[in-house]
Image: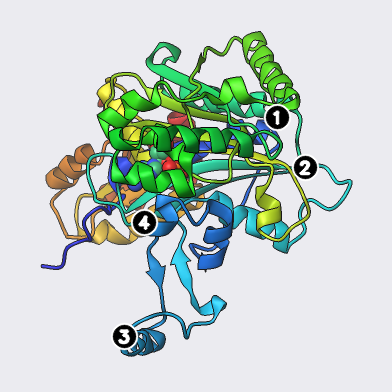
Amino acid sequence: MAQRIQGTEDLYGGYMRAWQHMQDVARELFGAYGFDMIETPAIEQVDTFVHGIGESTDVVRKEMFRVVSGALFQNLLEAGNEDGLKAKQRMAMRPEGTAGVVRAVVEHNLVPQGAAPAKLWYASPMFRGERPQKGRLRQFHQVGVEWLGAPDAAADAECIIMLMEFYKRLGFEAKDLRLSINSMGDAACRPAYREKVRAFILDHADEMCEDCLERAEINPLRAFDCKNEHCHEVMAAAPLANDNLCDDCAAHYAQVKRYLDEAGVAYVEDPTLVRGLDYYTRTVFEIEAVGAGVGAIGGGGRYDGLVELEGGKPTPGIGFAVGFERIALALAAQGASLEGDEPSCVYVACAGSEQRDAVFSATLALRQANIRTEADYQGRSLKSQFKQADKLGARLCVVFGSDEVEAGVATLRDMETHEQVQVPIADLATEVAARLA
Ligand code: AMP
């Protein structure tokens, strides 16, 4: 039997409704903040991610699913390396949404000089070649936003406020969420800070893991993220970003916090919070569902240098991404659910095959009126049609008997109260709609 790839999931039934519900909530809330939806391709040139995410990140180095066309694949096998491939032939499945959206913003010049910021949101599958485990998939789904062209601290605060409201509308209680924030500095202060952390790691080289020693050279701040307990303890004494901000970054960070305070959003400052991707500047944030044991359920931050890395004019940006599967797990751990009820329907039944044509016409009319309508397609008895209607959660049944069809009427049966009335066939859709309302 064919099986799905490990670390991928089929979305159907309640789980699919949950994903759609998450998108509906996003559309309404993000719409109120002025965001429009964008869908970029699931495959991009590798360079888009290398520039946008950073050569030194695990995502780019180890986790990207690379794509080659069938014809090139054979060449690649024969050559033994990808040196002969042109840039446009080197493709990857997107591991995250920001790089592709920023590429699209640059390509279509969506933030021309002097224009209002571009505010975009997406709901898309992402692909990472990770070792699958609970809450860690190879294909997962994110809802995310990117806000390009807004340097003001109010944009950082509004992003976070909107995100926390998003969780609330998805069913989380504020007390079950922990929002951590930090400022990572900018091009003025980060290089010196980075150097301090590098020097710190090298000073403690004999106490740290191989990976961290490598990080010291390519991206020392990532050592704060090391999963090795001992490295974690050592890094507790490392210089903190907070103490190394330039005046502009410090003022920006203070303003973000003032806005969050004013909006009543609770947060903890975590000076060791560094997000995994290279492009972040200034504000970074991450959200965890306390006690759910699924890791971060969302995160984001400011990326003022990214548009330039993707070949555009200097344009500040900020955004976040939220993982659907982890949200579903975290809500389940807290006894809540995104699923919602199965949609109810109307079932059109008939006493015998002589009335099947009447069923056909009635289902057409009801569906034309946007009423979810089901009928029997297997020649079942009336009794088993009722059973089927119950299973489908039908609230109403329309029943055709022989006398009724001749009289131009149908019986309308309320499946809960068992109350029955006869209605003219011509009025069926209006009557049913009124009763469902
Ligand atoms: P990141 O881009 O790594 O910050 O991811 C943003 C959010 O996506 C995380 O907070 C998770 O909720 C979710 N996420 C990231 N990686 C995975 C994965 N491999 N499987 C499922 N969800 C993920």
- Earlier in the chain: of badge 1 and badge 3, it is 3
For residue 318, what is the image quadrant?
top right
Q: Which residue of the protein is positioned furthest toward the left in this rendering?
A: 1
Q: Which residue of the protein is positioned furthest toward the right in this rendering?
A: 114
**Mark 1–mark 4 distance (CA, rounded to whole Å):** 31 Å
**Mark 2–mark 3 distance (CA, rounded to whole Å):** 45 Å
* Kind of residue at badge 3: Leu
- Earlier in the chain: of badge 1 and badge 4, it is 4
**Mark 2–mark 4 distance (CA, rounded to whole Å):** 32 Å
SS of the residue at dot 2?
A: loop
* Kind of residue at badge 1: Ala
Does residue 169 lie above or below 79 as drawn? above
**Mark 1–mark 3 distance (CA, rounded to whole Å):** 48 Å
Left or right of 125, for residue 129: left
For the residues bearing labels 2 and 1, Cβ distance under 8 angstroms: yes
Residue that mark 4 sits on: 63
* Residue sitting nearer the eye, 126 or 271: 271
SS of the residue at dot 1?
A: helix
Residue that mark 2 sits on: 117
Where is residue 208 drawn, in percent x and y?
A: 31, 36
SS of the residue at dot 3?
A: helix
For the residues bearing labels 2 and 3, Cβ distance under 8 angstroms: no
- Earlier in the chain: of badge 3 and badge 4, it is 4
Where is residue 123 drawn, in percent x and y?
A: 50, 47
Q: The N terminus lies in which quarter of the figure?
A: bottom left
